[in-house]
């Protein structure tokens, strides 16, 4: 860590939180489970999931990056996010910096970012909005709901069970403008291939999303614990 810009490291951490971008490897399990029944209409299911996602006030996020994505140093992230009654977040992330991996804990509370690049050694980095707006992932206008509402030519492509939840797998493409709102400047073309897994029953929550901003390189996100209470406390010593 010697000589590494601390604020740059924290910016990468918070950007990872905002992504919407979900720690699937080793944390969630996906199994093909197509019953053979007719698949629901993809456009209708995406519309239902868009409305459900717009109304999500809190969720657990797991994020992983497969490959190398320019302007994104995140490798994995696990965190709890809340958008109401106030923006708050906490979790752990692994980022790639200076040719190696660095792990850190983070907390966002009352608009302030705290990060610990060494266990228990918390620092106050001031307004989170000065580095990255952590609320973007649950923001109804610019987060995952916006990704869903901008999914072009959606096609149902089977069923998968993810952590015990039966989902419909839907493929399509998302315009770069929508991708830039959730993860700026990572796309290499005007449209980004996208796959979403939407809960088939209930409120049709978005269970998993995968974006491929460049060939062979992807961000995969999994959401769970929708609207469950998230308790975030100020770290000790700051």
Image (cartoon, rainbow, N blue to C red):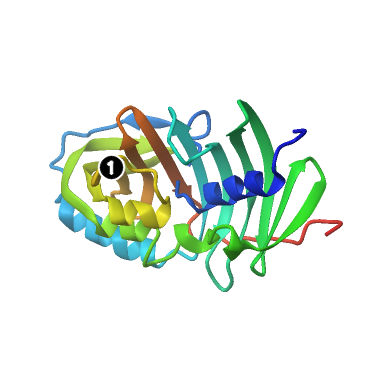
Quadrant where the C terminus is found in the figure? bottom right
From the top left corner, tell me how far across and down residue 74 is, in percent: 53, 38
Residue at the location (74% across, 61% down)? 233
From the top left corner, tell me how far across and down residue 38 is, in percent: 13, 42
Circle 1 residues within 10 Å: few <14, some 14–19, many ≥20: many
In-image side of 207 versus 28 (left or right): left
Image quarter of residue 157: top left
Question: Which residue corresponds to mark 1?
Answer: 194
In-image side of 125 versus 82 (left or right): right
Of residues 37 and 44, the one nearer the viewer is 44
Residue at the location (21% across, 34% down)? 35
Residue at the location (78% across, 53% down)? 123
For residue 110, say whether it is visible.
yes
Residue at the location (45% across, 48% down)? 223
Image quarter of residue 101: top right
Where disc 1 sits, the SS reads strand
Quadrant where the N terminus is found in the figure? top right
For residue 201, say whether it is visible.
no
């Amino acid at each position: 860590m010697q000589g590494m810009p601390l604020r740059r490291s924290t910016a990468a951490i918070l950007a990872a939180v905002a992504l919407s971008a979900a720690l699937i490897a080793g944390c969630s399990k996906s199994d093909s489970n197509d019953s053979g029944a007719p698949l629901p209409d993809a456009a209708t299911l995406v519309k239902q999931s868009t409305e459900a996602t717009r109304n999500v006030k809190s969720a657990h996020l797991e994020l992983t990056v497969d490959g190398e994505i320019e302007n994104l140093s995140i490798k994995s992230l696990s965190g709890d996010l809340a958008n109401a009654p106030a923006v708050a977040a906490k979790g752990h992330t692994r980022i790639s910096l200076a040719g190696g991996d660095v792990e850190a804990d983070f907390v966002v509370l009352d608009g302030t970012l705290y990060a610990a690049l060494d266990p228990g050694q918390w620092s106050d980095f001031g307004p989170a909005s000065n580095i990255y707006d952590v609320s973007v992932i649950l923001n109804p206008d610019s987060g995952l709901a916006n990704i869903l509402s901008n999914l072009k030519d959606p096609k149902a492509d089977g069923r998968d069970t993810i952590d015990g939840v039966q989902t419909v797998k839907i493929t399509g493409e998302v315009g770069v403008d929508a991708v830039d709102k959730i993860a700026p400047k990572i796309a290499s073309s005007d449209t980004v291939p996208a796959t979403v897994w939407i809960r088939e029953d209930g409120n049709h929550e978005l269970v998993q999303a995968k974006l491929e901003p460049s060939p062979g390189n992807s961000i995969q996100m999994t959401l769970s614990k929708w609207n469950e209470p998230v308790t975030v406390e100020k770290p000790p010593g700051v």
